[in-house]
Image (spheres, grey):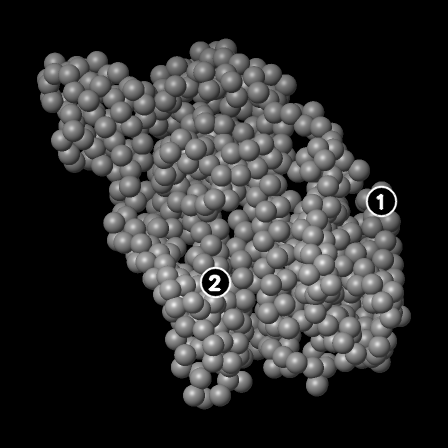
């Protein structure tokens, strides 16, 4: 009977993310960000909920664009250390915010709709890892299922599909490893928990958003600290040593990612992540969105606010905890005689600390940002997933209390009243937006009423079902109300997908056929980094951190007023000088970086007039409904021999044959950056700096020049990673050899 019950819950848990994503899985709608963020989408037909409830373009220009290129490199049996398709060539793994080394998951990005499939896989992992954690804590199957369901349907997974969401799937696995070691120390039996925690930490880091991974690690540390406090003194050393060993092993395993990223930070600018984030807080208007996410409508309604405050709200929020789940989480902290009492309080304090920091509560904010490293992190954006996990665990504990007769209706009513009062108070400042939204957005009242009414009904159903000794039907109905409400909220972004969409394939094909090894520069269509997605080299780039040599060159020679980390005509951070006239003024500098084509919006005539007048070396080469493409007729080649005394025959970006009448310098218009090596007929030669690009000395006669990039300190990082793997393997072998689990 137990086996059948377990199978039922496991199957139900596996099916839940599939059902929540059925509009996309069925092929009815698409949420592929390439259509809405690349600038190349055409014929976009909105789904039932027109518009996108929450948009974070980095799911397209970083996770998908760079991730797809990395997946193709792996499929071609090459490690994707370098990205030749953006800027003058830029490091890929070292950029730190793309999933280049996130194996095997990154390979999903080689498939159509790959980012969606990757997010779905992570949802499944999050669900089962949370279930395993809660079952290990002796919660019942129904409660563990509910916890897994709530976490895999969390607000971060619902809203976002970019890199900050990817480490969160492994957070419950990290906690499971800690919990296994605590149980083993308490009961004095062997455990592989440290290995589970080490692998979870390594995967969190390879998921390539260190801010989220770090915050999840802090939650793991808080969990471990509470468990340490309740262990007998004589058993604490073992627990501490094994948890610390897990942390060290996880970091060692992730060294091939961490070392290049750390080096990149030393030679780059980090834009707004450098300092001062500890002084930023959200305005109180955003507070109700943390529990009733669409009370101010979806993100697309923010355009009704000319001040931009509503848009800022959506940029800064990273998830939500639905009201019914929040009620159950509060109820869990009120159970004085319930198991894991201290842990419940720690999880509640964690949620309070994150919310207090997000909204600038002075003492709380100061204490949180005193933690090393957090002053450079958008806590308000990247900490919500940890709160969602804490809330899911607390809600599961409350459900377990209820099922096992440890919670009565009074406790539920008090919790519901407390949450209701808090939500009502949070609505007061947000209510100022209601007149504006009612007047500007046709369907806003429907969103407002539906949000409040459904939240209230779900809470009332849960409270009405709770009894000290629940019947089977009441328990099932209450459980359905808690999970079903989260399910419904999760579906909203999926129903806002696109019914039909296509890309401007003729323009992509024109650029691919005409560029060769040269580049284009886009001033409108084709958002940065999508050059890597389509395999067409673009001088545009969107990198944080951004190599300092490239940032300096943008400011000195291309466009002083642009944000170098977002080198593009328009977009997130438009500037007064980001216009076509600026491109024309600095055209020789663009041409010197092998820019052969300039891409402008179809309705802009600036370059057309210049080309027609002969005032600039420009020629209209392609035109369609989205764009005009102009050829820069004096663009420098990718490979060039100084003095012109050579015949240069490129074989690829990394290999060229030269036939020279005399010794000369070969210029390769790829960024001069630590890690590049060159050989002439197999013999190592020095790479010199020519402006911001590379040059090597080549002798008289016919020679083959080859280039190869390997990250600095690669041998050290590989050795560290191998050491971590040896430690992990040795531990597994020892325990298997001795018959231990």
- The vertical placement of 280 against 513, above or below, is below
Q: Quadrant of residue 433?
A: bottom right
Which SS class for mark 2?
helix
- The vertical placement of 3 against 608, above or below, is below
Q: Residues within 10 Å of mark 2 (few under 14, many from 20)?
A: many
From the image, state whether disc 2 or disc 1 is nearer to you: 2
Pointer 2 or 1: first along the chain:
2
Contact between labelled residues 1 and 2, with CB atoms less than 8 Å apart: no
Label 1 sits on residue: 443
Q: Is residue 20 visible?
A: yes
Image side of residue 318 versus residue 28, left or right: left
Label 2 sits on residue: 196
Q: Which residue is painted at 81% across and 60% down in the image? A: 480
- The vertical placement of 466 against 677, above or below, is below
- Coordinates of residue 470 in the picture (x, y in percent): 85, 73
Q: Nearer the viewer, residue 631 or 504?
A: 504
- Coordinates of residue 637 in the picture (x, y in percent): 32, 20
> In 3D space, how far apart are the residues under numbered discs 2 and 1 (Cα atoms)?
48 Å
Q: Quadrant of the N terminus?
A: bottom right
Image side of residue 408 versus residue 635, left or right: right
Q: Quadrant of residue 417?
A: bottom right
Which SS class for mark 1?
loop
Q: How many marks?
A: 2
Q: Is residue 310 visible?
A: no
- The vertical placement of 513 against 458, above or below, is above
Q: Nearer the viewer, residue 125 or 545?
A: 125
Q: Which residue is painted at 59% across and 47% down in the image? A: 121
Q: Which residue is painted at 73% across and 61% down in the image? A: 5
Image side of residue 374 versus residue 737, left or right: right
Q: Residues within 10 Å of mark 1 (few under 14, many from 20)?
A: few
């Amino acid at each position: 009977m137990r086996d059948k019950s377990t199978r039922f819950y496991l199957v139900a848990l596996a099916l839940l993310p599939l059902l929540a994503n059925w509009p996309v899985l069925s092929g009815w709608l698409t949420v592929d960000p390439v259509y809405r963020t690349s600038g190349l989408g055409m014929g976009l037909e909105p789904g039932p909920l027109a518009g996108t409830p929450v948009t974070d373009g980095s799911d397209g220009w970083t996770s998908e664009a760079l991730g797809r290129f990395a997946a193709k490199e792996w499929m071609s049996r090459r490690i994707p250390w370098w990205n030749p398709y953006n800027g003058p060539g830029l490091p890929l793994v070292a950029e730190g915010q793309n999933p280049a080394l996130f194996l095997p998951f990154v390979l999903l990005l080689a498939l159509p709709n790959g980012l969606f499939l990757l997010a779905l896989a992570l949802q499944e992992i999050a669900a089962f890892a949370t279930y395993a954690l809660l079952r290990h804590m002796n919660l019942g199957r129904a409660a563990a299922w509910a916890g897994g369901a709530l976490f895999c349907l969390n607000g971060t997974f619902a809203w976002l599909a970019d890199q900050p969401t990817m480490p969160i799937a492994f957070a419950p696995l990290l906690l499971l490893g800690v919990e296994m070691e605590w149980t083993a120390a308490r009961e004095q039996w062997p455990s592989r928990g440290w290995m589970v925690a080490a692998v979870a930490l390594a995967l969190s880091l390879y998921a390539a958003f260190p801010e989220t991974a770090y915050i999840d690690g802090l939650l793991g540390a808080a969990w471990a600290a509470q468990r340490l406090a309740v262990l007998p003194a004589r058993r604490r050393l073992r627990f501490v040593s094994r948890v610390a060993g897990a942390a060290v092993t996880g970091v060692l395993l992730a060294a091939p990612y961490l070392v290049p990223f750390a080096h990149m930070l030393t030679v780059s600018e980090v834009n707004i992540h450098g300092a001062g984030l500890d002084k930023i807080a959200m305005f109180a208007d955003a507070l109700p969105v943390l529990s009733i996410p669409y009370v101010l409508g979806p993100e697309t309604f923010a355009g009704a606010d000319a001040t931009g405050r509503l848009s800022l709200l959506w940029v800064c929020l990273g998830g939500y905890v639905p009201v019914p789940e929040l009620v159950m989480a509060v109820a869990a902290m009120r159970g004085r005689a319930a198991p894991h009492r201290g842990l419940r309080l720690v999880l509640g304090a964690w949620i309070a600390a994150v919310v207090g920091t997000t909204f600038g509560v002075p003492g709380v904010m100061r204490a949180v940002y005193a933690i090393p490293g957090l002053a450079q992190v958008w806590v308000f954006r990247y900490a919500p997933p940890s709160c969602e996990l804490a809330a899911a665990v607390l809600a599961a504990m409350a459900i377990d209390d209820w099922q096992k007769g440890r919670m009565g209706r009074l406790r539920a009513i008090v919790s519901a009243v407390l949450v209701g009062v808090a939500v009502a108070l949070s609505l007061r400042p947000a209510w100022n937006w209601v007149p504006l939204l009612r007047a500007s957005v046709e369907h806003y009242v429907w969103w407002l009423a539906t949000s409040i009414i459904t939240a209230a009904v779900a809470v009332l159903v849960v409270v009405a079902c709770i009894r000290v000794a629940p019947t089977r039907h009441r328990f099932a109905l209450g459980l359905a109300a808690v999970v079903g409400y989260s399910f419904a909220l999760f579906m909203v972004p999926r129903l806002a997908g696109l019914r039909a969409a296509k890309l401007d394939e003729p323009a992509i094909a024109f650029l691919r056929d005409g560029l060769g090894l040269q580049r284009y520069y886009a001033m409108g269509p084709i958002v940065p980094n999508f050059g890597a997605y389509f395999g067409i080299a673009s001088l545009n780039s969107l990198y944080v951190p951004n190599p300092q040599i490239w940032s300096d060159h943008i400011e000195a020679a291309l466009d002083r007023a642009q944000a170098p980390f977002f080198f593009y005509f328009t977009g997130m951070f438009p500037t007064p000088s980001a216009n076509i006239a600026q491109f024309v003024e600095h055209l020789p500098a663009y041409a010197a970086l092998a820019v052969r084509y300039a891409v402008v919006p179809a309705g802009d005539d600036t370059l057309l007039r210049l080309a027609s007048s002969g005032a600039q070396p420009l020629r209209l080469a392609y035109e369609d409904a989205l764009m005009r493409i102009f050829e820069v007729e004096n663009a420098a080649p990718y490979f060039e021999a100084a003095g012109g005394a050579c015949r240069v025959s490129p074989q690829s970006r990394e290999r060229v044959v030269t036939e020279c009448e005399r010794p000369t310098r070969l210029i390769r218009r790829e960024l001069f950056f630590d890690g590049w090596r060159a050989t002439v007929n197999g013999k190592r030669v020095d790479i010199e700096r020519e402006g911001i690009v590379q040059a090597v000395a080549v002798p008289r006669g016919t020679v083959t020049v080859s280039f190869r990039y390997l990250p600095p300190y690669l041998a050290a990082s590989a050795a560290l990673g191998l050491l971590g793997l040896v430690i992990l393997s040795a531990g597994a072998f020892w325990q298997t050899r001795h018959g231990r689990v």
